[in-house]
Amino acid sequence: MAKIENKLYTREELHELEEWFNNVQLPESIQLDKATFIPNVKETLSRLILQAEINCDNPKMQGAIYILERLKAKLEETQK
């Protein structure tokens, strides 16, 4: 299994990520990967952003930001 690089995101990086999502057309649902289906992208996105803002300074709680990055990459891939 690949090791996930630990990265502590700054609040500025989080806000840039949030702005990116605000300026893109979001699908209603998306298959993020083989095991992850998001049935309501907008609701999931708002909850992930809230969780990321709360835990931004905690290096052990960066999971929400990691999922946001994966969702951004998937959306960029599907919009090509």
Image (cartoon, rainbow, N blue to C red):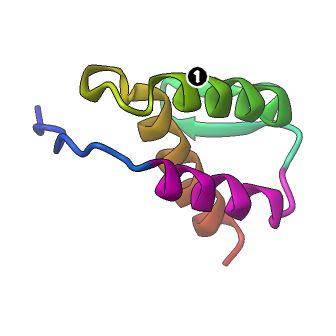
Give the side of residue 14 with respect to residue 43, left or right.
Answer: left
Q: Where residue 8 sits in the image (x, y, percent)?
A: 28, 43
47 up-or-down from 19: above or below? above
The part of the image, by quadrant, that contains residue 56 is top left
Q: Where residue 57 sits in the image (x, y, percent)?
A: 36, 31
Q: How many marks?
A: 1
Q: Residue at x 78, y 35 (%)?
A: 41
Give the side of residue 54 with respect to residue 26, left or right.
Answer: left
52 up-or-down from 76: above or below? above
The residue stretch that appears in magenta: 11-26
Q: Residue at x 57, y 32 (%)?
A: 53
Q: Residue at x 11, y 31 (%)?
A: 1
**Residue 16 drawn in magenta:** yes
Quarter of the C terminus within the rendering: bottom right
25 up-or-down from 65: above or below? below
Question: For mark 1, what is the residue?
Answer: 51
Q: Nearer the viewer, residue 49 or 80?
A: 49
Q: Where residue 79 sits in the image (x, y, percent)?
A: 71, 71
Q: Nearer the viewer, residue 21 or 28?
A: 21
Amino acid type of the residue tagged 1 in the rendering:
Gln
